[in-house]
Image (cartoon, helix red, strand yellow):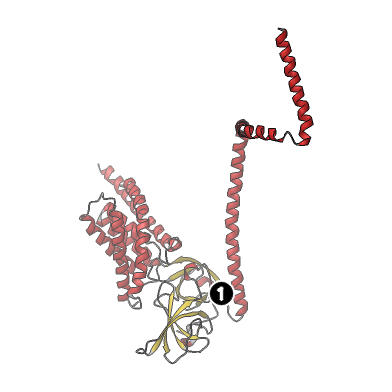
Amino acid sequence: MSSWRDRRVALVLILLAGLLAGILLQPTGYLKPAEDIVFTLFAPLQYSFHWVSTRITHGIQAIRELRTLQSRVAELQQTVDRLMIENIRLREVEIEATELREQLQFKLANPTYELLAAEVIGRDPSNLLHYVIIDRGVEDGLAVGMPVVTSRGLVGRITTVYPNSSRVMLLVDPASSVNALIQSSRATGIVQGQGRGSLTLRYVEQSEQVQVDDIVLTSGLGGNFPKRLVIGQVREVKHNDADMFQEILVQSAVDFDRLETVLVLQSFVATE
Amino acid sequence: MSLLSESSQVRSTINLYLAGLLLLIIALLQTSTMPSLSLSGVMPDLMLLVVTSWSLLRGTWWGLLCALGGGLFLDLLSGGPFGVATAALVLSSVVIGMGELNVVRESRWLPLVASILATAVYDLAYWVLLQVTGRSLHTVYTLLKVLGPGLMLNALFMYPTYWVLRWLSQRTS
């Protein structure tokens, strides 16, 4: 019994001695190797215990907050939905504002034109025809033959009018032809639609100097369109000695696949 | 017995009106929604797919009726010469009806093959009719530029259209 007590006292004394040694040795740095060994051995265990305890704590917390969380998720989902709708709406407003700004600039640059804005509400059901339907008609003062433009350039002209809508033949339709001239050389010809966004300038004499990137404008000849409306830019010039005329491919200034808003030139009356 | 036949007559009349309304909606979708699904500027021909599917599901006569009704709506909304869309649709529905007699109806590839055949016939007929009616500026190159993406898009949209119409056919038959 006494030997057990002696051993206990000895253990306490050893521990106290260790504590004292630690207190004394730690500031001198002699304890560092021992500390390193202990930390190297215990760190993975410590990490594991921490990981498990954190998960358990979070689990318990989650169970406790389940009801609150569900309602918060629903609330956040509602906020996300609302913000998404608002974001889409604002993006649309931004696009519309940009378009209107461009139209205003066009209007300011051409004060003599009486313009009426219209929205594209439909397209031709056939892939071989190139027409759009706009939301303005006879009741808005539109008539057959009126040119349709955007701030970028000529779109086409009205071919049919209804009380509240009109049908516009696009420049790219194969049935469309416009008297045109090249801005730099003043060479004249006829721009014809080729379908699928391409235009060809025909009947330009071989002797005329035409360069790629030259601007093509309406010439006003024939009385179907006013003068100086932008049609597009020369993309390629094809010379063939056997032909009397050059064949010039024109890149339209307008993206016909993305037409949303157009301007109808009400002040111009076609002569045909 | 007469009461039964009278009620079935009323039902088929209602079905006919509903079919007309449906074709009108499809024609409006063709001009307003389909352009946003276009590939290289070519949009899927929803009306053609509906006519083709209906021909496969209900036979040549129903397909023909559908082609006539749908084609007239398309012609009303189109800037092209009146009757061209109807004639092209009728022709493609007749070709599909003729082919359908010789093909196993249950084949899973049938809608795909039918959509390809119908698109080719429809576009070619449309192109020829435009030439005949004075739109002679359309070149073969234009036709090929339309036909390529058109075949792909129509094949892609054929199965959803066919499945919806099969469901509708089962409900109304």
- Hey, which quadrant is residue A98 in on the image? bottom right
Instruction: Give the vertical position of B12 relative to A195 (above or below).
Output: above
Identify which amino acid the numbered label 1 is placed on: Ser
Which residue is at a point 38% across and 55% down the rendered structure image? B22
Sort mark 1 into few (<14), some (14-19) or many (20+) by Cα contacts within 10 Å. many
Q: Where is residue B68 drawn, in percent x and y?
A: 31, 62
Kindly tell me whether residue B81 is visible in this rendering.
no
Horizontally, residue B17 falls left or right of residue A36, namely left
Instruction: Give the vertical position of A60 relative to B40 (above or below).
Output: above
Q: Quadrant of the N terminus of chain A?
A: top right
Q: Where is residue B14 drawn, in percent x and y?
A: 35, 51
Which residue is at a point 31% across and 50% down the rendered structure image? B12
Q: Which residue is mark 1?
A: A151
Q: Where is residue A67 drawn, in percent x and y?
A: 61, 34
Instruction: Check disc 1 and report its element: helix, strand or loop.
Output: loop
Q: Quadrant of the C terminus of chain A?
A: bottom left
Of B107 and B101, nearer the camera is B107
Horizontally, residue A29 falls left or right of residue A178, namely right
Single out the residue that lies furthest toward the bottom.
Answer: A207
Which chain is mark 1 on?
A
Horizontally, residue B60 falls left or right of residue A80, namely left
Question: How many numbered marks have been drawn onto this rendered protein structure?
Answer: 1
Of B87 and A213, nearer the camera is A213
Horizontally, residue B17 falls left or right of residue A214, namely left
Kindly tell me whether residue A231 is visible in this rendering.
yes
Instruction: Give the vertical position of A104 relative to B30 (above or below).
Output: below
Instruction: Give the vertical position of A201 relative to A89 (above or below).
Output: below
Q: Where is residue A28 drawn, in percent x and y?
A: 78, 36
